[in-house]
Image: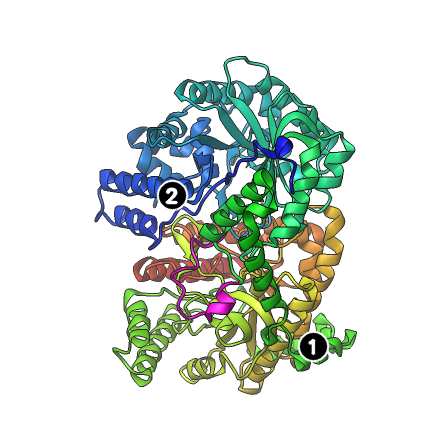
Amino acid sequence: MTPKSAAAAARSTVYGYPRQGQDRELKKAIEGYWKGRVTADALRATAADLRRTNWQALADAGIDEVPTGDFSYYDHVLDTTVMVGAIPQRHRAAVAAGPLDGYFAMARGTQDVPPLEMTKWFDTNYHYLVPELGPDTVFSADSAKQVAELKEALALGLAARPVLVGPVTYLLLAKPAPGVPAGFDPLTLLDRLLPVYAEVLADLRAAGAEWVQLDEPALVQDRTPAELNAAERAYRDLGAPTDRPKLLVASYFDRLGEALPVLAKAPVEGLALDFTEAAAGNLDALAAVGGLPGKRLVAGVVNGRNIWVNDLSKSLATLGTLLGLAGRVDVAASCSLLHVPLDTTPERDIEPQILRWLAFARQKTAEIVTLAKGLARGTDAITAELAANRADLASRTGSPITHDPAVRARAEGVTDADARRAQPYPERAAAQRAHLRLPLLPTTTIGSFPQTGELRTARADLRAGRIDTAGYEERIRAEIQEVISFQEKTGLDVLVHGEAERNDMVQYFAEQLTGYLATQHGWVQSYGTRYVRPPILAGDISRPEPMTVRWTTYAQSLSDRPVKGMLTGPVTMLAWSFVRDDQPLGDTARQVALALRDEVNDLEAAGTSVIQVDEPALRETLPLRAADRPAYLAWATEAFRLTTAGVRPETQVHTHMCYAEFGDIVEAIDDLDADVISLEAARSHMQVARELAAHGYPREAGPGVYDIHSPRVPSAEEAAELLRTGLKAIPAERLWVNPDCGLKTRAWPETRASLENLVAAARTVRGELR
C-alpha cells in the first residue's frame, strides 16, 4: 500500500495531445484553406472544436489538469516565434497583411519568399520550423494565442496548464538569420528575450493560469557551462516576479544530467522529468541533489513516444520511490503524446490479443490515470487493472511473433566481411563511370513522384473491392509510364519509377516483412499537414519474397537510361516505426538489414545498376548525449553496409538524408561507404556541402537545389546559383543535381516546372565549366 499521507495529492496530467482529430480533420481543414475551399473562420472553428474535444476527452478519462497552448496549425516552435515577435524580415509584410496567411508563409514559403528552415525535433520524426535570429532581432510579446486557448479550457470548467517552449530551448534551437555573420550565438539574446516571456507569463496569470509549463528539452543534451549559466539566469529572472503563475519546468527524451542541479535550485515551483528507460539516471540524479523538497514533481513514467503498454507495477515502484523526493508527485507521460497515434479502438485488422499490447494516446491517458489512482489510494484500488496488465505483458513475452529462431541464427552468423564491399571506393567509382556513362553534374530525383488523387482513389478502390488487382496494377503501370516519359522528355539522367504503388516509404516495406504490424488509423504528425502511419515492429524480421523488383524492372524496360531501385534503409525502418522494446535496437537493425540485403541483391540480379537505400533518419536517431553516440553509430552504419555490401563494384549505391543537422554525423556518413549521397540543402543554403568539404568527404554528393516542402517553384537561375555555391565545396566530377527530398507531397504542375528548371540549371552550369 502507498502511504496515503504522502500521496494524497497525486494528480494526473499530460504535456500535449495529438492535434489532428480522429479523422485528421485539422489536416483537411488546413489544406482546404490553402486551396480556397475553406474559409478562415471555418478553419478556426474546426480548430476550436478539436481543442474542445481533446480537453473533454482528457477530462472524461480522469486527467486532472489538461494542457493548453500545445495545439498548433503547423508547429509549436513557429507558434513560439510568433509569441515572441521574432518574425523574419522577409515575412513581416505578409504577417502584417494577414496573420494567418503570414503564419503559413513562414511555414511553407511563397513563390517569391522562401520559408523558414525545417529540421527534426531532437531525436524524433517531428519537424519544427527553425527560428532565425540576429543581433538586431527585437522581441515583442504576443500572448493572444496562449491566452485565448487557456480561456477556452477554463470556460469548460477544466483545470488547465498552458505549455510553452522555454526561452533557453527556443534560443538553442535557433540559427543565425540569413546574412548574419557566422559565429553569432542566438543565446546572447537571452536577456532581451526574458522580459518578453515574463510579459506572456503575466498575461497568462491575469487570464487565470495557476501553473505554466516551460519546456526545456534542450537541457537534456550536453551543455557548456555558459549554457547552463544561461539556464540558471533564465529561471532566476523568470522566478523573481510575484505576479506570475507557478512555474513547472519540463524536460524529456533523455536524462537531465548537469542541468538537474541548476533547475532543482531555481526559484520555480516544480519540475517535470522523464523517468522512462530513455532517461535512465534521472531518479538517482534527483536523489543525489536532495530531491525537490516542498516542490511539485511531475513524473513521466508512461512512455510518450512508443506504443507498448506500460508495466504498471514497475511504474508504481518508481513513483513510490519518488514520493520521498518531492513535496508532491504527479503522474504523466514522459513527453507530449503528440508522438503517438490517437486511439487503438478503431483498429480492426490487428488481432485483439495483440491489440492489447498496444497503447496509443487515449490508452496512455488511461494508464496515467490508473497510476495516479494507485499512487494516491494504494494498489488495492487498482487490483483489476494490475492483473489485466500482467496478463497483457505475459502474452507478448510468450508470443511466437517475437521469436523466430531462423532469423536470429542468421543475424548471429554475420561477420565483419559481410558489412564491407569487396572493392575500395576509387575502384568502384571508375567501374561505375565506365558502366553508367553519365554526364558531368548528373541529374536525378530522390525517388517518389506526386501521389495524385487518382492514385489514392485507386488504392482505396482496391481495398474496398471496387476494382480487382488487375485493374489496380494497370493503373500503376500507366502511372509509371507517365513518370518515365516525363523524366526522359525533361532530360533527367538517372530516372526513378515514381513509387506509385507505395503508400509510405516505411509502411510499404513493413507490410511485406514478417514481424511488422500495420495500422489503419495510427496517424502521427510529421510536419505541418503531413501525417504518417508508423508501422509497429513487433517481432523478428524477414523478407518472404521480393518487394520492389517487379515495378523497378518494369520501369527499366521503358527506358535506356538507368532507373534507380528504391529502398528504405534499416535505421529509417526502425526510426519511423514504433520499435520493439524487448531487445537492443542494434539487434533489430541487423535483422532488418539482412532482409533488405536480400532485396538489394535481387534488384542487382534483375539488372538494376543504381540502387538507393534511403537513410533520412540516421541523424534523427542520434542519441542526445555524446557519450551514447559511438555505440549507436557503430550498429547504425554497420546495418547500412550490411544492406548494401553484397553488390558488384559497377553497381552504384546511393543513399539519401533530409532535414537534419548533418554536420553532427559527417564521419558516420563517410562510414556508410555509399557511392553517392543526396542531402537536403536548399533551405540551409548549401550548408551541408561546406560540412562535407570540411570533413574531406571523398565520394559523390547531391546537395539539394529544390526545396520540395514548399509549393514555390525555384527558378532555373536560383537552382543554378545554389549549384555554383555547391561547386565551391564539391568538385564538379563528384557533384550531383537533385531536389532536397521526394516529390510525393507535391502537385504535378509545380513538380514539372521545378524539375525542368533543375535540369536547365544543370545544363547552364555544365556550360560554364567547359
Residue, x 26% and y 46% (percent of image)? Answer: 33
**Depicted 750 relative to depicted 292: above or below:** below
Q: Which mark is residue 655?
A: none
Residue that mark 1 sits on: 408
Which residue type does callout 2 highlight?
Asn
User: Is 420 colored magenta in this rendering?
Assistant: no
Q: Which residues are magenta?
A: 340-356
How many marks on residues?
A: 2
- Spatial CA distance of label 2 from label 1 is 43 Å
User: Is 348 colored magenta in this rendering?
Assistant: yes
The C terminus - image quarter: bottom right
Task: Identify the secondary structure beneath mark 1.
Answer: helix
How far across and how far down the image is residue 667, in percent?
A: 71, 56
In depth, the one of 747 and 55 nearer the eye is 55
The N terminus - image quarter: top right
Residue that mark 2 sits on: 54
Crowding around mark 2 (Cα neighbors within 10 Å: few <14, some 14 to 19, many 20+) is many
